[in-house]
Image (cartoon, grey):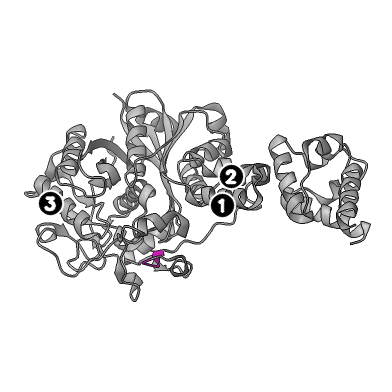
Amino acid sequence: MTREDIITNINKLLVDEFEIDENSIVPSAGILEVLKIDSLDLVDLVVLIEKKFGFKVQGEDMAAIKTMEDFYEFIINRLAVQNK
Amino acid sequence: MKRVVITGMGIYSCIGKNLEEVRNNLYSGKSGIGIDPERKPLGFRSALTGIIEQPRLKGVLPRRLRIGLAEQGEYAYLSTYEALKYAAIDEEFLERNEVGIIFGNDSSAKAVIDGIDVMRDKKDTMLLGSAPIFQSMNSTVTMNLSCIFKLKGINFTLSAACASGSHAVGVGYLLIKNSLQEIIVCGGAQEINPYSMGSFDALSAFSINEKSPFQSSRPFDRDRDGLIPSGGAASLVLESYESAKKRGAIILGELTGYGFSSNGEHISIPNVDGPARAIKMSLKDANCRIEEIDYINAHATSTPVGDATEAKAIDSVFGKSKPLISSTKSMTGHECWMAGASEIVYSLIMMKESFIAPNINFENPDEDSAKLNITAKTIDKNIYTFLSNSFGFGGTNSTIIVKKYKE
């Protein structure tokens, strides 16, 4: 999967599951602002990532993710490690 | 004591997804029973069940309000939406007034089992997500609907086996009668997935007449061989008379009597005394003579023992007046936790439309049902007062009486 494929998949996941407007997904935007999610939704985000990409996000990982760009990079890097 | 009236109703069942569909199917005596092909591979003795279309609420409710709903909660959302609309209660009214909710519900098996499957597979509770806790608790219906409709009054779930829905209506009635609340949405909800019914099938309580699903539920008939599990949800808006008049609400009927009792005997084998006491208590509460009851919506589920004991109980009280009787379970199957509420909705539809729905498949009486005035055909007739029975495991009994509204 290319970097673009992964980003497309992440965006599709967020649009499908969190029912957000695709146009609101801007890389520089804050992840909480884009997803408009609360603490319960963060629990669901962990589940969705595990289902879609096969690894579990830890609480400390999420704490370091501020923007959508951070989120993409985190997933891309984890997948790269996983695929080595 | 306040007068308690009914100003709204809604239904989602195997004989219709709204009041109009249900009215038509009640009148024409159409069965909602069919075969679920998933059941035999799971080891079910009977694959018979009420067949219900699963609602699609994605796009109807926002995600956070939707994902906590278990199957029966989705049904209850739709029946409650219809009931509040009927009662002309809108968001603005709910914002400004304390409207309560009491539902009968006694399981959320699929949500529990699905969650446990994930735990066993992943061995990590974090991977359950946020929905299972809100779907799996017994109070799942009321905890979700109170948030969806922004309800600010009393808020709890009542569990009393197959009398849950009836007791929920009865308790709502008592709260309004005693001036503790002006408006309460009362109802019952029932999941119908195979996981929720396996342990019931284990008791050999279900009909095995799989060749003729429409003929399988035959309450009071000599050749009945068991009940058919079913489900859905029903909602009623109970309101004080003063509140209804002040709002200019349409009054569907007046709830005048609630009777209850416990058999104090066997966990699954009913008796005659318990139901008879609940019926008598409801008549006393309603200050109602037996001759005033025009119609009895019987609990009769189509089991050999249950129908016989109810027939004896009814005959012991109404032996002289012989009101018309039908069990709408002949069409719906046994809607379990929901049945007490749905059967009040069915009876209210009959009262409003001046007909008595048939006890379909009642072809030959047995020695107990022969003493009752059971109708196998639809009868066009005014109903001024009806009585609805509901009984459940553990010997819990509930009887509700509703009168046509008069000033």
Q: Which residue in the protein does label 3 denote?
A: B312
| Mark 2 to mark 3 CA distance (whole Å) | 44 Å
Name the kind of residue labelled 3 in the image: Lys
Residue at horizontal 27%, vertical 57%? B301
Both marks 2 and 3 on one chain: yes
Q: Which residues are magenta?
A: B45-49
Is residue B398 visible from the viewing direction of this image? Answer: no
In the image, B133 versus B180, the foreground residue is: B133
First in sequence: mark 3 vs mark 1: 1
Q: Position of residue B326 (x, y in %)?
A: 23, 57
Residue at horizontal 21%, vertical 51%? B295
Both marks 3 and 1 on one chain: yes
Both marks 1 and 2 on one chain: yes
Name the kind of residue labelled 2 in the image: Pro
| Mark 1 to mark 2 CA distance (whole Å) | 8 Å
In the image, B396 versus B3, the foreground residue is: B396
First in sequence: mark 1 vs mark 2: 1
Q: Looking at the picture, does residue B252 appear above or below residue B332?
A: above
Q: Residues within 10 Å of mark 2 (few under 14, many from 20)?
A: many
The answer to whether the residues at label 1 and label 2 have Cβ atoms under 8 Å apart is yes
Residue at horizontal 31%, vertical 57%? B203
Picture quadrant of residue B292: top left
Q: Nearer the viewer, mark 3 or mark 1?
A: 1
Q: Nearer the viewer, mark 2 or mark 3?
A: 2
Does the magenta portion include B67? no
Kindly report the secondary structure that dominates the magenta region of the rendered protein: loop
State the mark number for residue B166.
none
Q: Quadrant of the N terminus of chain B?
A: top left
Does the magenta portion include B48? yes
Q: Which residue in the protein does label 2 denote?
A: B132
Q: Which residue in the protein does label 1 denote?
A: B114
Label 1: chain letter = B
